[in-house]
Amino acid sequence: MPSSLIGVLQRRCEDVDSTCPDPAQLTCLADVLSRMPDPRRARGRRYCLGSLLALCLVAVLGGAQSLAAIARLADTDSGLREKIGLTSSTPDASTLGRLLARLDGDALDDAVGTWLARYAADPVDEPGHPLVGLAVDGKTVHGSRTDGTAVHLLAATLHACQTVIAQRQVTAKSNEIPACAPLLNRIDLRGVVVTDDAMHTQRAHAEHVVTAGGHYLLVVKGNQKKLLRQLRRLPWKQIPLQTRTTGAGHGRREVRRLKVCTVRPGLLFPSYVPAPHPAQ
């Protein structure tokens, strides 16, 4: 393992359209994490919460796979300790383990996602600025277990730089659908196009996005039978082809054709949310 993992992180980001966190941004990250609810008792605290969490985050991104490896990084990299605020001594593996076992995972996701969105997303305040693509998708975490079942996460990822800016754990006895609105509640959707698969082609999800000032691009399949039947009746042969792409993925050759049209009012899916009438 190299003496500093900051260079490792920077090399991993070379092919990504985003800037990897530099040491100054790591200091800001520790400050953001310090504002999280601290599960430890006030008496006997030796280390700042943000410093410990920033250490764990950088170490894991750099390849650490155990608490002992994270603690070793703190011992060997004095520059990193200074940047994240570990100036007096270094924590051992048991200290890190007790903290992580009691930490609120959703609060940590929100804090890290807020910090990543600040550095990865472009501002959309100016008129005519291109829209920002945000993909929502769920994945099972390899090797994870909670009550005997694998952990399943629903994540929101920026298209341009493949950066996850928010995520939520899906409960074991549920699916991704109830987790979608809480996931998007933490994100400013103005100027954002939310893309998703057919599972999330739900009226409530579309209304949530539009009400928040965003746009959506969803896949229509058999779970929306009436909407699919309605779309199939559109005059697709008369609609000009915009573009065509070919590629290979998931063991098959894929051909995608893009056609764009405007439909009349009456589509069985929300395209806008009317403004509320003023109180009489």
Image (cartoon, rainbow, N blue to C red):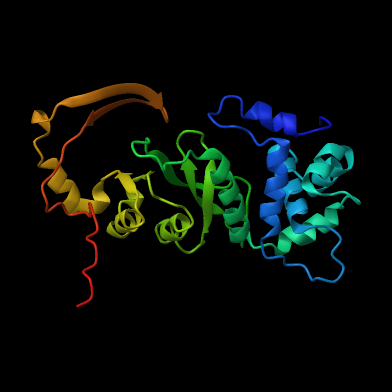
Along the line of sight, the residue nearer the viewer: 131 or 14 = 131
* Residue 87 visible: yes
Q: Residue at x 19, y 47 (%)?
A: 228
Q: Residue furthest bottom?
A: 280
- Measuring from the top left, give residue 87's x and y in whole percent: 87, 49
Total number of numbered discs in the rendering = 0
- Measuring from the top left, give residue 205's x and y in whole percent: 33, 56
Relative height, residue 67 to residue 203 (above, below): above
For this view, does 178 lie left or right of residue 3?
A: left
For this view, does 11 lie left or right of residue 172?
A: right
Q: Residue at x 42, y 56 (%)?
A: 180
The quadrant holding residue 81 is top right
Relative height, residue 139 to residue 278 (above, below): above
- Measuring from the top left, give residue 248's x and y in whole percent: 39, 24
Along the line of sight, the residue nearer the viewer: 16 or 31 = 31
Quadrant of the rendering where the N terminus is positioned: top right
For this view, does 175 lie left or right of residue 91?
A: left
* Residue 77 visible: no
Along the line of sight, the residue nearer the viewer: 274 or 134 = 274
- Measuring from the top left, give residue 76's x and y in whole percent: 88, 38
Quadrant of the rendering where the C terminus is positioned: bottom left
The quadrant holding residue 12 is top right
Q: Residue furthest right?
A: 89
Relative height, residue 169 to residue 56 (above, below): below
Along the line of sight, the residue nearer the viewer: 209 or 241 = 209
Q: Residue at x 48, y 64 (%)?
A: 173
Q: Residue at x 63, y 56 (%)?
A: 108
